[in-house]
Image (cartoon, rainbow, N blue to C red):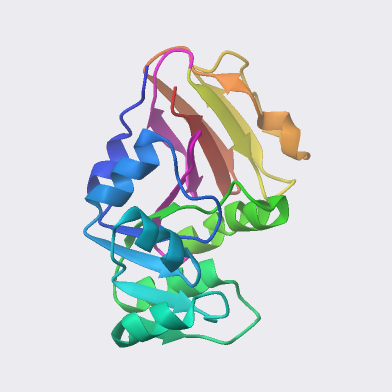
Amino acid sequence: MLFNYPTLASMKTAILANGKFPEHIVPLNILKEANSIVCCDGATVKLEKFGLTPKAVVGDLDSITDELKAKYSDRLFHFPDQNSNDLTKAVNWCKNKNIKNIVILGATGMREDHALGNIGLLCSYAKLGINVEMVTDYGIFTPILQPKRFESFEGQVVSIFSPRNETTVTSLNLEYPLVDLQITDLWMGTLNKCLGNWFELNFAPGPLIVFQSHI
């Protein structure tokens, strides 16, 4: 079963990071159907090869070709600050343009340190008031700041990550129930499964990052 994520229908802007270019039908369809695409620096090269055009190219611009710099000179946004990565620069650019619904693609699949860093930043983006999700070839990462019920399907893999050791989590409708569990290590909330078409997470304090598999 391929899950039809209910939230993605509202997503209008895709940010393409310079990780592994998507191969799965879910992220590829999001890329094709997005109203606009913001590229993180060198991801522009990959988007060009795919046959699509970015609305904006954002970053320190150290990995985009001179040819593409010339081609997209009217939509280059250079932010040389090294205290944030290109993905955060792209998210901040969207926020400054009052773009609040964002799906991030291409943020994993290559260097593991980059992937972990990008996933870990999701909660920071949510705290900015942005409705953000990260879609990979395997599933979707969603940051949540408040308790939430998720649409799902029976057997969907669900993993839960907590940036804060003091966060206490209780789950409903998961195969391995969490009851006032403090997720003090990354592995502790992983590889659970949904028992039906929904599951719920109650927790305090937040945030959490939730992964749901495509199949």
Residue 196 is inside the magenta segment:
no
Give the image location of residue 102, x and y in percent.
36, 57
Q: For this view, does 127 lie left or right of residue 111?
A: left
Q: Between 3 and 174, which is closer to the camera in this rendering?
A: 3
Asked if residue 151 lies in the magenta stretch, the reply is: yes
Q: Is residue 91 above or below residue 31?
A: below
Q: Position of residue 129 (x, y in %)?
A: 40, 63
Find residue 134 and report its horizontal and vertical position in percent: 46, 48
Q: Is residue 204 left or right of residue 51?
A: right
Q: Is residue 72 visible?
A: no
- Range covered by the magenta-colored residues: 127-155
98, above or below 3, in the image: below
Q: Residue at x 39, y 24 (%)?
A: 152
Residue drawn 67% across and 43% down?
A: 167
Measured as percent of width and height from the top left, residue 93 is found at 40, 76
Q: How many marks?
A: 0
